[in-house]
Image: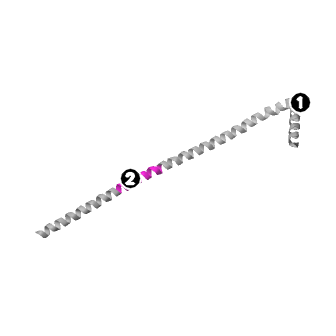
């Protein structure tokens, strides 16, 4: 309850003083607005630059991820190609063994 009464008293006194010191209030306001605009603008510039840095960093990270994905895809393709080549090599080895065995049989028959 005390806080409510104190708030009402402060609001009434503030309103009375605002009316009595209107010219002084406007003078302070005229001096303060440019400062607030200058500080607000500087803050906005800082935040904008920081946001641009974050966007550039995020873009670089996405490019790195794409490169890594591409490398992984190429690696998988190379592995599949290697497996395919190994299977073909094993097949040719078997054919070579069969051919050697056939040649040896022919030599023995002669």
Is the residue marked by circle 2 packed among few (<14), some (14-19), or many (20+) residues within 10 Å? few
Q: Residue furthest left?
A: 110
Viewport quadrant of the N terminus = top right
Which residue, given by chain and number where applicable, does mark 1 sit on?
A: 20
Q: Identify the residue at image location x=48%, y=48%.
A: 66
Compared with residue 1, is residue 88 higher up or lower down, i.e. above or below?
below
Magenta-drawn segment: 67-82
Q: State how far apart marks 2 and 1 are (Cα).
A: 84 Å
Q: Does the segment drawn in magenta span residue 72?
A: yes
Q: Residue furthest bottom?
A: 108
- Residue 97 position in % (x across, y down): 23, 65
Q: Nearer the viewer, mark 2 or mark 1?
A: 2
Q: Identify the residue at image location x=63%, y=40%.
A: 48
Q: Identify the residue at image location x=76%, y=34%.
A: 33
- 88 or 18: nearer the viewer: 88
Which residue, given by chain and number where applicable, does mark 2 sit on?
A: 77
**Colour convention:** one colour
Q: How many marks?
A: 2
Compared with residue 61, is residue 101 higher up or lower down, i.e. above or below?
below
Tell me the SS state at disc 2.
helix
Compared with residue 18, is residue 46 higher up or lower down, i.e. above or below?
below
Tell me the SS state at disc 1.
helix
The secondary structure making up most of the magenta span is: helix
Q: Identify the residue at image location x=15%, y=68%.
A: 105
């Amino acid at each position: 309850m005390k806080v409510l009464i104190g708030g009402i008293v402060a609001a009434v006194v503030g309103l009375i003083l605002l009316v009595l010191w209107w010219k002084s209030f406007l003078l302070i306001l005229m001096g303060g607005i440019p400062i607030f605009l200058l500080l607000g603008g500087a803050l906005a510039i800082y935040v904008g630059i920081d946001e641009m840095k974050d966007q550039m960093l995020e873009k670089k990270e996405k490019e790195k991820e794409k490169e890594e994905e591409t490398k992984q895809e190429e690696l998988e393709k190379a592995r599949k190609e290697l497996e395919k080549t190994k299977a073909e090599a094993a097949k040719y080895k078997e054919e070579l063994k069969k051919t050697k065995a056939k040649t040896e049989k022919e030599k023995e028959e002669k």
